[in-house]
Amino acid sequence: MQSRTPVPAVGVVCLRGGPGAWEVLLIRRGRPPRVGEWSLPGGRLEWGERVEACALRELAEETGVTAELCGLIEVVDGLFPGEGREPDRHYVLIDFAARWISGEPVAGDDAAEAAFHPLDAIDALVDWSETRRIIRAAAELLSAP
């Protein structure tokens, strides 16, 4: 079991294309929680690191992609169960919207795969409803005039 203290972490919804043709960058998780599932690039905040810098660092480490942050989407609690019913991991996920600048995804760090997917494919690919909701919120934010 991990520490009983919530862990601050970031997630990045990196989009490329435009309204009606957005693609979202997803990674297939190589480590717990949610091993093997498609998710957002991201990770733990390091001591002394600003959240925006963490978001861009994690994006680059997990995918090799460069992006511009476009705003905070939301802060989400990730309570993930272990082998029992009680959560054994509690992440405070700080999710940002980002616009792709350059690079083609290559899985790195703790990502098993990294790829852009059409926005309309997320219901079939992404298991966690909170991740799907955050992706849609980012697309709305980036599509607003």
Image (cartoon, rainbow, N blue to C red):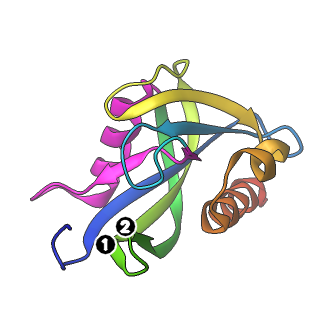
Residue drawn where x is 31% and y is 72% of the image:
88
| Residue labelled with disc 1 | 88
87 part of magenta stretch: no
First in sequence, mark 2 or 1: give its number. Answer: 2
Q: Is mark 1 on a helix, strand or loop?
A: strand
Q: Label 1 sits on what residue type?
A: Asp
59 part of magenta stretch: yes
Indicate the quadrant where residue 125 lies: top right
Q: As drawn, is 5 to the left or to the right of 133?
A: left
In whole angstroms, how far apart are the C-alphas of marks 2 and 1? 5 Å
Label at residue 120: none
Whether 138 is drawn above or below 16: the answer is below
| Residue labelled with disc 2 | 82
Q: Give the percent coordinates (x, y) of residue 51.
A: 30, 59
Q: Quadrant of the C terminus?
A: bottom right
Q: What element carries label 2?
A: loop
Residue drawn where x is 46% and y is 44% of the image:
41
Contact (CB < 8 A) between labels 2 and 1?
A: yes
Indicate the quadrant where residue 57 lies: top left
Tell me if mark 2 has few (under 14), some (14-19) or many (20+) residues whose alpha carbon lies within 10 angstroms of its own: some
Which stretch appears magenta? 37-65
